[in-house]
Image: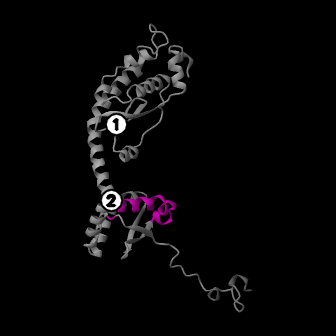
Amino acid sequence: MNEEVTSTLSTKVQEIAKAPKYRGAIFQIEADEKGLALVDCKEGSLKVYLMIDPDSDKVLETRFFTYGGPIFTALADVFCRMIQQKTIDELAQVKVEDIEESLRDNPDVRAIPENAPEIFQMKTLIARIAETYPEKKGQAILVRTQMEAIRYRTQTAEGRAEADKEWNALTKVQRIERIEEWLHKTVRGTLQGDGGDLEILNLTDDNRLQIRYQGACAGCGSAMGGTLFYIEDELKNNVYYNLTVEPEDPLANYQPPNAADIPGLDDNTTPKTLTP
């Protein structure tokens, strides 16, 4: 830390800045899987992540990241601790002045200079969290509803029976059309953005979707790993739970040349490079 800066800060601020407990990040996929709302707000060099239960509006998990130095680190770490299990309304009432007082070594000596820009930025951040939450709550409820529907149709006997009945009523052409529609909606844009694509070769009677990677995807290692898993998972969850995806083996139709047809590899033909 800069000595000129640290000389104006309390020992508590400096200690927390060296070893914060709540530094880190929370990703949207984590919130979606748990049916929770993720509020991530940034102000200046500080970004906070809050996982909130949309049923109770309570904060269940908090993280922050900053490259802004000891003041933001200490303020954010204490803030993340203070709002655990608080509702969003209670969070909105948190005062930066109370955070600063909790960081003092001596009740009469400020832990952070009164004119520090981080004080004002922290106030703005708290207000922004409260303003952002209603929209994030609505998104979380929608995603939760969608994921519950997916779980019903892919993981329950009743749901699978309904999915089987619907799938079996479709012709092969209609099944491929549904698959194409979902691939176009969720997968093709990403593949094409990286210079690749895929085409459907066939859909077998036992629901094996045979595909051929094109462009950059044809030679990409992840096409047989993460990309393939994502494609199959999307189709299982949103088209039919019993689908499997099989990429074409690029060497499946490869026919090695007959040695007798290669000049120089038999006893009677001299390679041109060795002909005097």
Work out which quarter of the rendered image holds the N terminus and state it.
Answer: top right
Q: Which residue is mark 2?
A: 156
Q: Is residue 220 magenta?
A: yes
Q: Quadrant of residue 274?
A: bottom right
Mark 1 Cα-neighbour bin, 10 Å: few <14, some 14–19, many ≥20? many
Mark number for residue 52? 1
Mark 2 is on which residue type?
Answer: Thr
Q: Nearer the viewer, residue 236 or 256?
A: 236
The image shows residue 43 at horizontal and vertical percentages of: 38, 30
Q: Position of residue 131 (x, y in %)?
A: 27, 31
Q: 259 or 112: which is nearer to us? A: 112
Instruction: Using the image, tell me which numbered label, if any, was put on residue 118.
Output: none
Residue lying furthest front in this view?
157
Q: Is residue 154 above or below residue 144?
A: below
Secondary structure of residue under mark 2? loop
Q: Which residue is located at x 34 percent, y 19 percent?
A: 95
Q: Which residues are magenta?
A: 215-240
Q: Main secondary structure of the magenta part?
A: helix
Query: Quadrant where the C terminus lies?
Result: bottom right
Left or right position of 48 against 140: right
Q: Residues within 10 Å of mark 2 (few under 14, many from 20)?
A: few
Q: Position of residue 31 (x, y in %)?
A: 37, 43
Q: Is residue 124 above or below residue 26?
A: above
| 154 or 273, nearer to the observer | 154
Return the x and y of residue 198 as percentages of the image width and height: 40, 67
Is any atom of residue 191 visible in this view?
no
